[in-house]
Each structure stands twice: as structure tokens, then as C-alpha cells.
Image (spheres, rainbow, N blue to C red):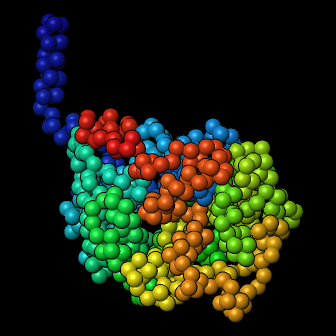
Amino acid sequence: MTRTITYLVMLAVLSFITACKRDFLERDPYGVLDETDYFKTDGAGLKLVTGCYQPMLDGWGYTINKVAIGDESVDNADAGGSDPGDRPQTTEVGRGRPLSSNPLLFETWSNRYLGIGKCNIALDALKREGGNLVENGAPLPSEALARYFAEIKFLRAWYYFDLITVFKEVPLLTSVEDPATRKGKARIEELRNQLYTDLDEALAEPNFPRASELPTSETGRATKDAAYTLKARAALFFAGLMEQGKMEGDAQGEYLIAKEMAGEVVQHGQLSLLPDFQDLFRGDYQIGPFSKECIFGVLRKFDPAFNLTGDPFAIMNAGRNNVGGWGGDTPTRDLAAAFDAADPRKMFTIISHNDTFKATSGGEEVHNYRGYFNDYNLQQNRKAFVPQAYRQQNDLQRSNWQPYWIRYSEVLLIYAEAIIRTNGSRTDALNYLNQVRHRAYVTTSKMDESAIYRLFAAGLKTMDEETFTSDYAIKASDDILRAIKQERRFELALEGFRLYDLIRWGEYASTMKAFYEKYGFADKGRDASENSWPFPIPQIEIDRSNGALVQNNNY
């Protein structure tokens, strides 16, 4: 009897289980949205766009990396750090023959492709789900959606150009690929065409705003002026490679593109230089990022309540010892020697050993640059330094320091160079070149407001128009192209441009060889040659490609 009852109970339970509906047993986890539902949530479209900027917020993978490649690997700065073993990846690139296992190059590759991938995902999603997007409780206006597309295309072009300046030829991905897909390198001509296509489509979009139209609340977002400048910057680079026989194409045509693009910004952008160079790099970052000079940057604000952290660039590249930084990005003796003693930008670019800044306690902060991998140069980057008055709790990681990736002064110099390269008006070129120099020599402060003593302030004097015109303005009889090249170094030093310039001018090998012969520090430039660039593709990426990706033939 007991067996019969047990059997009947088990049969009943089994019958109950098999009778249960499938949706009762198989339920989606709580708090999880599928893609379709996600795109119906408020602000989903803007979040996609914001995600495309995210790789630039990576202080290590983007900001520190970009300046390390652009300045510390060449004659503007050394890697610095606690000792020779602190940042060997940067020192290795600086010698001129990095290994394919170099972590700095792999970091560049990984970060930029992360950005490209985010852009491809966002473009794909917006095409499919644009009609479902909601903003502030209402359907997303078509004008806003169109702006999103333009913004993302600009960012994809931005990331690709970073890769081109380091590796020359890389895989071209313009859509969401299956993870199993493996691609080889695209020819640089192909990459150029895609970069221009993205920028041209962004520029053709009426809802993509000019920088002058951007409200303060949107500072940091891309604009038409950023796109014009990126195309001009890229055109100068491609023209240089074409002149050197490193890619196919019409160099003069590229210089004309650079002239047209930069001219659009200068003539119609309603932008201007800040009168005082110090306002860009004082350390407060309350003026420069919101000025008509800043065309594109990454806005940073330390605010722990919203989990907003400072950029580690500010602590990585400040002096060690009592200053509290980690001692990276040490300006070279060569950079310091290149400046005219009457140029205040020297003081606002380079801090010297024993320079003294004001402390919030009312005392002094004497910069001691001895005892770490800076004993040779004894200099640090003023553009990276945040004085105590602008830090929270005297912590270099708690500041609003931010990088400027496009400034109007660069556009003026691009325009001047493109005019000369295309046999345009020398008078016009001198006008734009001397606007940059006039700001430096005449209207820039001759005193660092945050300092008590600055070595490079010695001899700086107020300069009147007559003295500038007679002694410091570039003249028609001067070598204008040479003057433009020098001015780019003075104006943009330690902002990530130097490698780009040396490669496109065909001067990398000669400059770095001469640097090694003159200084010899850390063997920088020892192995530099015409075969140093493009730098090697990371070996780990070649291994992952199953043979699709091959190493650059100069490595």
C-alpha cells in the first residue's frame, strides 16, 4: 500500500512539472534590457555617442600615451620617471628601433581600436534604432540624430589618424565585424580615402555645429571646426609622405586641401587666440578650455561625488620629491636651447630645477629635480603642472587639468604653412604666423602668477609693437617655411605634435641622429634611421590574426 501511495505522489509531481508553462520556468533576469528595449530608454542615443569619446578619457592609454609617442620619443622630452627602468617602453621608442613587443605601441593600438570599435557599434545601432530613440521623454529630433552621426564619424577619423601617424598602414574596419574576422593592413591610400570620407560626411551635415555655436554646457564635443582642422592636419601629413615617395598621390593637391580646410576655420570660424598664453596653462583650467582658442579637448573635472577623477597626466608628468609627482615627460636641453630667451612660452613650457612656486600654506614649493631619471635635463613640463592653489588637498590627482588636442594657434600655423607650400601670398602667410608670435612676445604675461622664482623669467621684458615688428616678427626676407617649422615647436611643444612634424617633413632620422651625437642621454636617437618609421605593429596582434596581418617591411 505504501509503495502504491508513493508511486502516485511521484506521478502527480512529475505531471505537475511537465504541465508547467515554459515561460514560468525560463524567465529573463531582472534588471537586464535587450538591445531593442535599451534604445527606447531616455538618452540612449547620447550615451552611445558619449561612449565613443570614452577612450580619450583614459589618462594612461590616451593622454599620457599620445604625448609619450609624440614628444618623449623624439627631441622635445625624455621619458623621465624614478629610474631608467621606470618607463623603458618610451625610452625604447626614443632610441629609434622599438621591438614589436613594445608596450607603448601596443597601448596605442589597443586604445585607438577600442575607440574605432565603439564608433562602429554606435553607427550601426543608430542606423537600426534611430527611430526608437527618446530624449527628455520625447522622440529624438532628426536634427539631433544627424548630429550624432557626424560626431561619431569625426571621432572614427580621429582615432584612425592617430594610428596612421604611428603605424602608417593598419586594418580598416568601418562596420561591426564578427569576432572571428581577421583582417590585414589596408594601404595608406585606402585609409586616407576613408578618413576623408568620414570627415567630408561630417562636414556636410548642417546640424553639426561650428565651435562658435557650441554652448558652454557642451564644451568638449566635436564640431565642424575640429573636423576642418583634422582634415587639414591629415592633408599636411599625407602631402609630406607623398613628397618622400612613401605613399601615392598628389602632394600639391594635399597642400591645397590643407589650405582650404584651415582657411575655412580662420576665415569663417569666428575663433581667436587668447591674448595671454598663460591663461591656457596656468593650472586652473577655467579660461583656456572655454575660450575661442580651444577647438577640441577633453574636459576634466575632479568631482568624487560623481566619480569624476583627474587625469593622471598631471601627476605622472610633475616633478618628484617634494613636488609629489612621478617625474615623467622631462623636457630636453635641446628644447630649452631652441627657444629665444625673450619668448615667455619658454617659461610656460619648461620648469627648471630650483624654480619656486607658491604653497597654499603661505610658504614655498622649491622644485628639486635631482635623485631620479631627470638628473641630466633637470626640467619638467610646465604645461602638465598644476600649482597647489588649483589642487584639492594638495593632491596632483585632484585637479581639473586637461589636454588641448586642437588649438586655434595650430590652425593659424597650418594655414601659413599651406599657403607657402602652394606658392600663395607670402604676406598672408606672414600675417598668420606673426599672429602667433605677437601673442607670445607682446601680450603674454612675463611673470608666472603661481611662482615666486622662475629661471626662464630672467630677462623677460614688456615689449611694445615697434620692438616686436623690428626685432621679433618674421619678415618677407626670412626663410618663412623654416620659421613656421620652428614656431610649431615653440607653440605646440609637449602637446604631442613633434613626431608628426618630423615624420611629415622627412626630418626624423637626421634630427634624431644629430640629437644622439650631441647629447647621447639614454641612447636616444642611437638607432634612428630612414627605416625607423613606421613603427612595428604589435606582435600580439599579428599572432591573433592567424596570418592575415603582416609586420611592416622595415621591421
Q: Is residue 115 visible?
A: no
Furthest residue toward bottom: 466
Q: Is residue 182 visible?
A: yes
Return the x and y of residue 82 as percentages of the image width and height: 69, 42
Q: Residue at x 73, y 49 (%)?
A: 376
| Front position in the image: 196 or 526 | 526
Exactly how many numbered labels are in the figure?
0
Residue 436: name its quadrant.
Answer: bottom right
Q: Residue at x 67, y 89 (%)?
A: 470
Residue 191 sits above or below residue 102 on the image: below
Return the x and y of residue 455 as percentages of the image width and height: 80, 66
Return the x and y of residue 17 as percentages of the image width and height: 16, 28
Furthest residue toward right: 363
Q: Residue at x 45, y 48 (%)?
A: 532
With 247 as the anchor, is 345 left or right in this view?
A: right
With 268 as the anchor, is 10 left or right in this view?
A: left
Residue 478: name its quadrant.
Answer: bottom right
Return the x and y of residue 233 as percentages of the image width and height: 41, 70
| Quadrant in the picture for the N terminus | top left
| Front position in the image: 316 or 431 | 431
| Front position in the image: 468 or 438 | 468
| Front position in the image: 103 or 479 | 479
Residue 135 sits above or below residue 465 on the image: above
